[in-house]
Amino acid sequence: MSHESGKSSVVAFDDKADFDLDQLPDKHREEILKQYDLPNVKVNLFTILGYGTPLDFALQILGSVTSVGAGTI
């Protein structure tokens, strides 16, 4: 597809007309399907903060306080 027509040049994986896995050898087809099958993962702020150590939180507080202090001088 040309870039001038305004259409995207990226081919959707599910579009069988443009990309067909049946023409690939079994080894390669299985590898692509493994990469395509991604689990649904829900990550939010509290999930990420659960991995923080007390030192991480202390450094965040120290950095916030010093940045506020530097801005008010």
Image: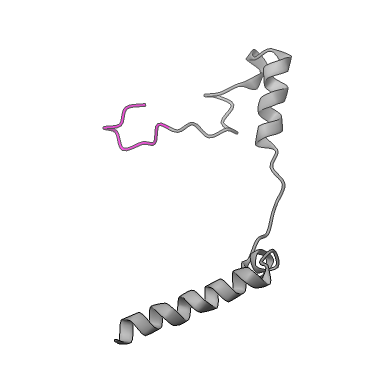
Q: Is residue 12 left or right of residue 23?
A: left
Give the image location of residue 69, x and y in percent: 38, 84
Give the image location of residue 12, x and y in percent: 53, 34
Q: Is residue 8 left or right of residue 20?
A: left
Work out which quarter of the rendered image holds the N terminus and state it.
top left
Q: Is residue 34 magenta?
A: no
Q: Please tell me in which quadrant of the rendered image residue 73 appears.
A: bottom left
Of 46 and 62, the residue lying toward us: 62
Placement of 56 over or under 5, stated as above or below: below
State the residue at coordinates (29%, 33%).
5
Placement of 39 over or under 12, stated as above or below: below
Q: Please tell me in which quadrant of the rendered image residue 4 appears.
A: top left
State the residue at coordinates (72%, 46%).
39
Q: Is residue 11 left or right of residue 57?
A: left
Q: Main secondary structure of the magenta part?
A: loop
Of 71 and 11, the residue lying toward us: 71
Give the image location of residue 3, x and y in percent: 30, 31
State the residue at coordinates (69%, 63%).
51
Of 41 and 68, the residue lying toward us: 68
Q: Is residue 6 magenta?
A: yes
Q: Give the residue at the far left of this rendering.
A: 4
Placement of 21 over or under 58, stated as above or below: above
Give the image location of residue 6, x and y in percent: 31, 38
Q: Which residues, given as a range, are shown in magenta?
A: 1-9
